[in-house]
Image: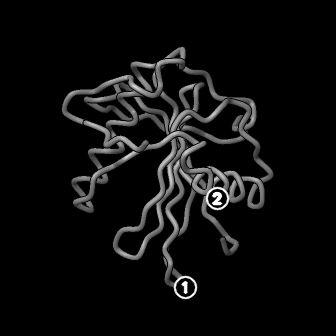
């Protein structure tokens, strides 16, 4: 059953098994606030079992574009469209968050973003990426990186 992420009262529900559960919950709330403010829609997450298509799409993009396979189990996923952009997010037990932003119209922006929750190490499968730091009231420090999608997905 999907649940709307509350970015006012941050909760670890759904990510409790993460060793960095508080930071991952803050990271998830940070994403929810961005989507709510930018697109005016609720950020609702489900388990990968409830929405296997979202996880399948992201893992397919990672594998086809860069040969990346994430070792950590996925805890929560979401996928939606807003303003002609297809979005998908996965929150992993390790504290990693991956999002895909894919403009549906030809020639639009298409990218994969990686964010690391405070307290987690860079996963081996992402060791070739350089991560920039940003501050967040909800998540503390977030380290992020991305790559541009070149293929059709």
The colouring scheme, among rainbow, by chain, secondary structure or one colour, is one colour
Q: Establish if 31 lies above or below 105.
A: above
Helix, strand or loop at disc 2? helix
Residue nearer the viewer, 132 or 53 = 53
> Which residue ends up furthest to the top in the rendered image?
19
- Give the side of residue 6 with respect to residue 25, left or right: left
**Residue at the image point whose x is 66% and y is 31% from the top:** 73
In the rendered image, which quarter is residue 114 located in?
top right
Residue for point 62% across, 51% down: 52
Q: Which residue is at a point 33% across and 49% down the rendered structure image? A: 43
Q: Secondary structure at mark 1?
A: loop
Q: Is residue 104 above or below residue 60?
A: below
Left or right placement of residue 5 versus residue 8 in this view: right
Where is residue 109? Give x, y as percent: 50, 71
| Disc 1 packing (10 Å; few <14; some 14–19; many ≥20) | few
Pick whichever, 16 or 71, lies toward us. 16
Nearer the observer, 133 or 71: 71
Question: Is label 1 in contact with label 2 (beta carbons under 8 Å)?
Answer: no
Q: Which residue is mark 1?
A: 106
Q: Which mark is residue 67?
A: none
- Measured as percent of width and height from the top left, residue 148 is found at 60, 62
- Residue under numbered circle 2: 57
- Indicate the quadrant containing the N terminus: top left, top right, bottom left or bottom right: top left
């Amino acid at each position: 059953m999907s649940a709307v992420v509350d970015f006012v009262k941050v909760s670890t529900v759904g990510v409790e098994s993460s060793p960095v559960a508080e930071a991952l919950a803050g990271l998830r709330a940070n994403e929810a606030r961005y989507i709510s403010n930018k697109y005016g829609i609720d950020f609702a997450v489900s388990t990968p079992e409830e929405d296997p298509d979202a996880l399948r799409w992201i893992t397919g993009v990672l594998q086809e574009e860069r040969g990346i396979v994430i070792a950590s189990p996925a805890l929560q996923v979401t996928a939606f469209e807003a303003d002609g952009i297809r979005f998908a997010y996965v929150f992993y037990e390790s504290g990693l968050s991956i999002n895909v932003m894919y403009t549906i119209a030809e020639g639009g922006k298409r990218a994969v973003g990686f964010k690391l929750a405070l307290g987690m190490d860079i996963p081996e499968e992402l060791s070739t990426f350089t991560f920039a730091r940003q501050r967040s009231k909800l998540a503390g420090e977030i380290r992020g990186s991305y790559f541009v999608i070149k293929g059709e997905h």
